[in-house]
Each structure stands twice: as C-alpha cells, then as structure tokens.
Amino acid sequence: MSRQKSWQISRRTMLRGMGAAMALPLLDAMAPSAKAAAPTAAGAGAAPKRMACMYFPNGVWQKAWIPEATGKDFTLPFSLEPLKEFQSSLNVISGLDKAASRRGDGHYAKTGNFLTGMPVEKTTGKNISAGGISMDQLVASRIGNQTPLPSLELGIDRVISGIDSNVGYTRLYGSYISWRAAELPVAKEINPRFVYERLFGEKDASGRETGQKKHDDYKSLLDLAWEDAKDLRGKVGRDDQIKLDEYLDSVRAVEKRIEFSMKTDPREWQPEALKDLPPAPDQKIPSDFREHVKLMLDLMVLAFQTDSTRVQSFMFANDVSGRNFSFLDGVSGGHHQMSHHENKEDKINQYKRITRWHVEQYAYLLGKLDSIQEGEGTLLDNSMILFGSSISDGNRHDPNNLPLVLGGKAGGALKTGQHIANPKNTPLCNLYVDMLNAMDVNEESFGDSTGKVPGLSV
C-alpha cells in the first residue's frame, strides 16, 4: 500500500535565485493546496481555463476555407487541412457577421473592432474609438487578478500611425485588436526578449519589472534559479519530476533561441556609429519572420503552462499587411497584393497558400498545447484558442461570413469536432457571448449579440 506524500506546495510557488523568479507549471504536488485555495465551477482542484485570440489579416479564399458539410461529418478544405490532427478538438464556425463594419471602407473599420464587434469611429485624428471594451479585455478585467499578468498582448509588426487617405481612417486601427476601453487600445509587445522578461523577470507588488537588464549583463533566468529547481525536483514525485524536466527544457530552448536571435551575424555589414548619435538598443527582434512567429507562439504556450496569464491576444501582422511570402513555394509576392486577387487563378492560388501557412502556425500552437499533460487532459483541453480574420474575402473587404476556427474545449465548457454554419447576418458577438461564459465571465450579451451560437456550449 503506497503512502501519499504529505509534502505539498502552493500553486503560486516560484523558482527563485539571484533576483530571478520563475512561475511553475501545474504539478500534482500543488493539487491539494489549489483545491483548498481556488475551487472552480468545473470542480475543486480543476486546472484553470485559458483563452487566446489570434488574428491574421486580409481574409481568405472562402472556397478553400469553409467545409461543404456541417455538423461532425465534415472534411477540412485546402486551407484548413493542417488542422486534420486536431479536428476533433476544434470548431469551424461560419456565417458570422460584423454589421458595424459595413459602414466603413477598406480594412480599418473591420480590424479595430475584431474583438469588440462595435462601430469604429471614422477619424484621421486622435479621437479613436473601437466602440467598447474588447472581449478579451473584459475577461482580463474579471479574472486577471488570479495571475501575475492579467493579460498578454503580442504581435509581430510595429504600430503604424498616419492616415490612409484612400479611406479616411487613421492607420492605428490596423495595429490593435485588444481595447481596454473604447478609446484605449492595449499596446502589444513584439520583442520576444521583452515578453520573456515580463513572464519570468522579478516583479514588484504592482507587477512591474524591478529592473531592466542590459544585454551585456544578461544571464539566463533558468541558470539563476537552477539551484532552487534542483532542490524542488528532489522533493516531488516521479510524475512531477517529468513535468518539471519538460518545462525546464522548454524554457531553456526558448532562452537559447532568444540569445541566438540577439547576436550580430559577423557576415552582415554594420555601419559605423556616429559619435553624436545614441547607441543602438540592446535588444534585437529576429530578422526572420518565421522565427519571430515561432518564438512568440512558444512564449504563448509558456505563459499558459506557467499560469502567468490566462488571457492572450496575438496579431500575425497589422492589417493591410503587404509582407512578402516568397519564402513559400509557388508564392512570389505580398499578402495584401494577393488578397486583391481580382478572381485571377494565379493570385488565388498564392492567396490560398499564404492562408494555409497561417493555419500551419495555428496547428503548431495547438500541437504544443496538446503535448502538455494537465490534470485529466492536456493544456489544449483546458484552453480556448480563437483563430480568424476580420474580413471574409480580401478582394471584397466583406465583414460577413468571417473565417473563424475555435480550438480547445475550455475545460469541458465547449463541444468540439463540428462545423457550425450560422444563418446569414448572425452577429459575430454571439460567439463572444459563448466564449465569455466558457471563461466563467457570465454575460447574457456582448456588443451587438442576439444570442449564442447554437450547439457550441455544453
């Protein structure tokens, strides 16, 4: 007869050493204290629910996105084929509309309200408004006090200001999807190094960094906390040792990639610094777009795995993104250019391939989440990952029948493995009501919602 260990640790236990503080994944040794400290609606000691909203620009070629059949017996079309492994753990949702976006030309009136569903103020000045708080920030305002970071907003592109004279909107609307209030967008972080320090650096009582490390003084946070990690490993059971080893290995892998991306390639020409100019910043964003994206996705997984936050958003690019995708076979141009396909077959084929690449990155994230055991299931089972764009077909700039996939079961709150086709003109915000309730933020309405998505919630 085995004896249960009486030694327990708190869910908020950190690995510490020499100014470093690292959160830990959910361990079996934490379950008793978690049960006593934070019972949830899903049951005492249940793993927390997480939510991420992932945005890609410029819409899709719908014939390669929307499955022909509805319900559970559906085949994933070309653009969604990379999700085959996870088909039973996701929902393809079609037919949803943002009526508030019909009154604005171009992209900006569609992107700024991707998570608010409300009208975007047409302005070329500072009087910006996305109509209200975004759905992710509403969740963060309710449950953000349960984690070190209330939410985490990530992206790849820098904020673009100025005016798009073609449509009469400030370009700022194309750079944000998270809004703390109608007039207050939430800044996204694009530097993996800074994201890492937010997650694992020492913080004061208000959650701010206690000090900024210079590049020359940079030391691995894992190295600084290594002695504490070894001591903890000797106290926990075998299953927890495996979990801890896997977690530390993943942290180390991200650290190595961040350090590598910060190094100056000796093969690259570097201009001589002029004496009257300030020195260049220490931190360096990866120059390779694909590596940049992968690093951010890995950090999103770590943020959820360590329960550093339960709410995240990620923008693959600002809207009207003209990023060149010539690194893909058969593609020889920019994303925005190909989205204006003019029904030309060559452009449509390239447009579909670019969309499929974004879906492949989403599948990568789902796979990482699904590989991490947590409680009776996986981190993916306990998460809810929205993936979509703010327009349907980039050639028409339509805000109706938006391309959307919702991965994960939100701790059992959602049914999965379905293509749910909604009637024409069904508000996108109906989906957001389901998502809010899945995160135990109980709201009967949000934005212009008229109900919920039938068959989605348990």
Image: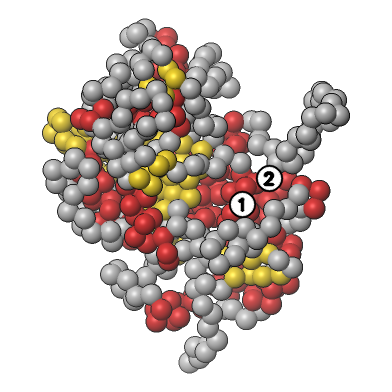
Q: Residue at x 80, y 53 (%)?
A: 217
Q: Position of residue 431 (x, y in %)?
A: 24, 44
Residue 387 lies in quadrant: top left
Name the mark nearer the viewer: 1 or 2: 1
Q: Position of residue 2 (x, y in %)?
A: 50, 89
Answer yes or no: is residue 457 visible.
yes
What kind of element bears circle 2? helix
Q: Which residue is mark 1?
A: 196
Q: Is residue 147 left or right of residue 49?
A: right
- Seen from the viewer's position, the closer of residues 457 and 58 is 58
Q: Position of residue 395 (x, y in %)?
A: 33, 15
Q: Is residue 260 above or below residue 358?
A: below
As shown in the figure, which amino acid type bears the numbered disc 2? Ile
Q: Residue at x 38, y 12 (%)?
A: 166
Answer yes or no: is residue 61 visible.
no
Q: Which mark, residue 258?
A: 2
Q: Residue at x 56, y 73 (%)?
A: 13
Separation of marks 1 and 2 at Cα, in angstroms: 9 Å
- Seen from the viewer's position, the closer of residues 435 and 358 is 435
Q: Earlier in the sequence, mark 1 or mark 2?
A: 1
Is disc 1 surrounded by few (<14), some (14 to 19) or many (20+) residues within 10 Å? Answer: many
Q: Is residue 131 above or below residue 336?
A: below
Q: Position of residue 47 (x, y in %)?
A: 40, 67
Residue 376 lies in quadrant: bottom left
Does the CB distance between marks 1 and 2 fall below 8 Å?
yes
Which quadrant would the C terminus be assigned to in this image? bottom left
Q: Is residue 181 left or right of residue 329?
A: left
- Seen from the viewer's position, the closer of residues 364 and 333 is 333
